[in-house]
């Protein structure tokens, strides 16, 4: 493990892994740092579109069938509990568990020979000396840096000098439940619910042995998203959700206008690269072909 890299990647989600993999594959010394120990849980519906599949193929070339759990060619749409449309034979929709999906991408990075530092948070980025200070006290220098450290990005703040304004983001709450298996023979159909939250939607996405039940909307429009999630969960499952809930901010249409500065590029959620309508982020920024 070195103390200087040509490319230092902060964040080992899909965008960070894509960056580190691309650099290392082309012979550039790279290191990716993440505060978590992988595999780790990540709040996300796990929907992978055909756009995501193409981005994955562009970056990693092979192994697509190993990173998703099930697929569908359509979806069901609801408004305030009533089905309003069913789309079939639309095309390929895939569903993954982000815990295994992200870990699989990071393993590809490791296979290229790139260095990986897990369980150590970047605390300070010094753009003058081109160094970053980790929580452990270790200091690492870089020539170029990729900021892929999520919606509350330390790297982004180093080049934009902006704080985290929650009112400009969406907030999502989700739970994995084995109680609903949305299967019809070999066919699985995701469900999208409108009217459950203002400026947002609810979802039930099928997985291999469970379903992701979640709801999200703009913070300044949606009020208490946690309460609305519990109401939505009960309406969908006829069960009360009593376990602790985890939420996550989403840069819903809140992209950065300063994504490149001081030999740093911010990508993925750190740059607000998500679809401004659906909130989809894995293809838009999280599998970025450098």
Image (cartoon, rainbow, N blue to C red):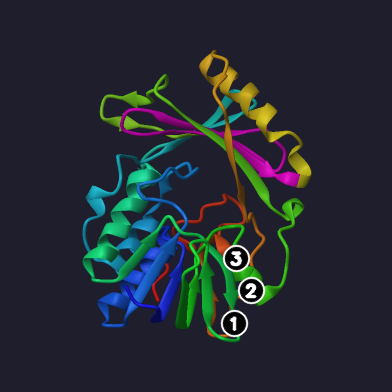
Evaluate if marks 1 and 3 touch, with contact meaning CB atoms under 8 Å apart.
no
**Dividing the picture into quarters, in which one does residue 128 lie?**
bottom right
**Residue 220 location in percent, x, y?**
78, 46
| SS of the residue under disc 2 | helix
Q: Residue at x 57, y 51 (%)?
A: 279
User: Residue visible at 37% across and 23% down?
Assistant: 181
Query: Looking at the image, is 227 positioned above or below residue 7?
Result: above
Q: Which mark is residue 158?
A: 2
Q: Judge whether residue 108 is colored magenta.
A: no
Residue neighbourhood size for the residue with mark 3, other residues' Cα within 10 Å, grouped as few (<14), some (14–19), many (≥20): many
Q: Are marks 2 and 1 in contact (CB under 8 Å)?
A: yes
Of 191 and 252, nearer the camera is 252
Q: Which residue is mark 1?
A: 127
The residue lying at 26 percent from left, 64 percent from top is 110
> What segment is highlighted magenta in the picture?
192-219
Give x and y (percent) for residue 10: 47, 67
Percent across and percent down for residue 287 are 41, 63
Q: Are marks 2 and 3 in contact (CB under 8 Å)?
A: yes
Residue 23 sits in which quadrant? bottom left
**Residue 231 sits above or below residue 43 on the image:** above
Instruction: Specify the quadrant that holds the C terminus.
Output: bottom left
| Residue 154, label in figure | 3
């Amino acid at each position: 493990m070195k103390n200087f890299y040509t490319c230092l990647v902060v964040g080992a989600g899909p965008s960070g892994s894509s960056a580190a993999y691309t650099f290392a594959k082309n012979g550039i010394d790279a290191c990716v740092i993440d505060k978590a120990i992988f595999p780790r849980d990540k709040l996300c519906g796990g929907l992978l579109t055909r756009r995501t599949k193409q981005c994955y193929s562009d970056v990693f070339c092979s192994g697509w069938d190993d990173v998703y759990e099930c697929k569908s060619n359509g979806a069901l749409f609801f408004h305030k509990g009533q089905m309003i449309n069913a789309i079939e034979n639309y095309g390929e929709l895939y569903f993954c568990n982000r815990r295994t999906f992200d870990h699989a991408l990071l393993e590809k990075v490791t296979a290229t020979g790139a260095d990986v530092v897990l369980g150590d948070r970047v605390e300070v980025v010094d753009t003058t000396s081109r160094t970053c200070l980790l929580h452990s006290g270790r200091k690492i220098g870089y020539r170029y840096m990729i900021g892929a450290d999520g919606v509350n990005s330390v790297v982004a703040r180093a080049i934009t000098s902006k704080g985290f304004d929650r009112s400009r983001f969406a907030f999502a709450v989700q739970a994995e439940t084995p109680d609903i298996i949305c299967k019809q023979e070999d066919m699985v159909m995701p469900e999208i619910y409108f009217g459950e939250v203002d400026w947002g939607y609810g979802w039930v996405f099928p997985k291999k042995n469970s379903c992701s039940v979640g709801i999200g909307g703009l913070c300044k429009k949606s009020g208490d998203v946690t309460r609305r999630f519990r109401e939505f969960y009960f309406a969908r499952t006829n069960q009360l959700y009593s376990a602790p809930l985890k939420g996550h901010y989403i840069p819903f249409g809140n992209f950065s206008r300063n994504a490149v500065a001081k030999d740093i590029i911010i990508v993925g959620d750190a740059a607000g690269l998500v679809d401004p309508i659906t909130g989809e982020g894995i293809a838009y920024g999280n599998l970025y072909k450098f």
